Amino acid sequence: MGKIITVANHKGGVGKTTTVFTLGLFLSKKYKVLLVDLDPTASLTTQLEFENSTDTEGVSEFIKNKENANLDQYIVSTKYENIDILKADEHLYMVESKLSASNKIKGCILKTKFSLIKDKYDFIIIDTSPAFGALLVNALISSNLVVIPVQNEFSVFHGLNLFLSTIEKAESLLEKDFDYKLLLTMYEKSIDENEEQRKIIQSSFSDLIFKTLIDYDPLIKKAGNHGESILGLTDKSKAAKQYEQLSLEIEKHKKKEYLTIN
Ligand SMILES: Nc1ncnc2c1ncn2[C@@H]1O[C@H](COP(=O)(O)OP(=O)(O)OP(=O)(O)O)[C@@H](O)[C@H]1O
Ligand SMILES: [Mg+2]
């Protein structure tokens, strides 16, 4: 039974897409993984190279398919043996605004659809855009765990509190608690303020933060879409090693009660 993880933060550029891609790569060494690109800018989609036809309809059609018939048709295999993807496409903006304009809370659309395919995967990992809109609410509702990458910087609390209070509002509106955990990204130990900040963040969020943190590491950036390079970088790149470590933390959570299926 697949576990669904949404990676989200309404602050841009904090490492959401990098986390989805790299975590997916390491989990795919042992598990079958589906990546879902819910960001209309499609940065995750462009990081993947496809074996199959690239003209397959993407996640918009997956969402729009009212009968939920043959949902597999929208899933594309990638050059990585255990990774499939639901690609972002140009219609996602429209889907987002249609869902948002709807009077009803249509937050269960993705949850219903994922329930029909999740037996095929051990992990479904969703990349989201910085916008807190209907697509994100849908992703949150479908998830067993929300991973919130936060950059280790002075302003982190302001942005984070805003995001968490928005999550709380969604929780009370939808009468559902979301399980979330923070992931410290782009950490630079050599910067004194960064180290101070890390201690404050880790003590403030204790259980709600992953033990693994991710260093700022130009090698991860440079590896870009070369997944094989990232998997082979664990000796040289601290961040790659840390993402491998994170995949083990996530694997442990898979067995925990709070990751039981909704
Ligand atoms: N640990 C890291 N060390 C160095 N650079 C990183 C690290 N993680 C991510 N980056 C780089 O930071 C930039 C932003 O990362 P990413 O695209 O993953 O963020 P994002 O949160 O998905 O952004 P957006 O909100 O625009 O979707 C990218 O250029 C990426 O290569
Ligand atoms: Mg992104």
Image (cartoon, rainbow, N blue to C red):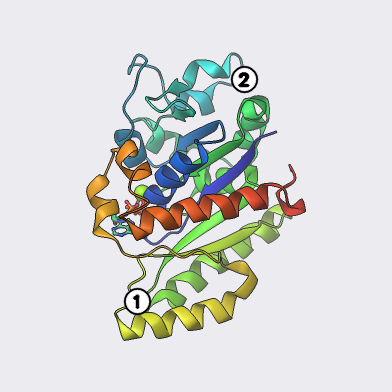
Give the secondary structure at mark 1: loop
Specify whether 184 is left or right of 232.
Answer: right
Q: Which amino acid does label 1 sit on?
A: Lys
> Can residue 176 be seen here?
yes
- Name the front one of labels 1 and 2: 1
User: Which residue is the site of mark 2?
Assistant: 68
Q: Quadrant of ligand 1?
A: bottom left
Closer to the camera, 6 or 62? 6
The residue lying at 29 percent from left, 79 percent from top is 190
What number is the disc on residue 122?
none
Residues at marks 1 and 2, CA–CA distance in whole angstroms: 48 Å
Q: What residue type is labelled 2?
A: Asn
Label 2 Cα neighbours within 10 Å, binned few <14 / some 14-19 / many ≥20? few
What number is the disc on residue 189?
1
Label 1 Cα neighbours within 10 Å, binned few <14 / some 14-19 / many ≥20? some
The residue lying at 46 percent from left, 65 percent from top is 213
> Residue 91, how many percent across, how many down?
37, 30
The earlier-in-sequence mark between 1 and 2 is 2
Whether the residues at callouts 1 and 2 have beta carbons within 8 Å, the answer is: no
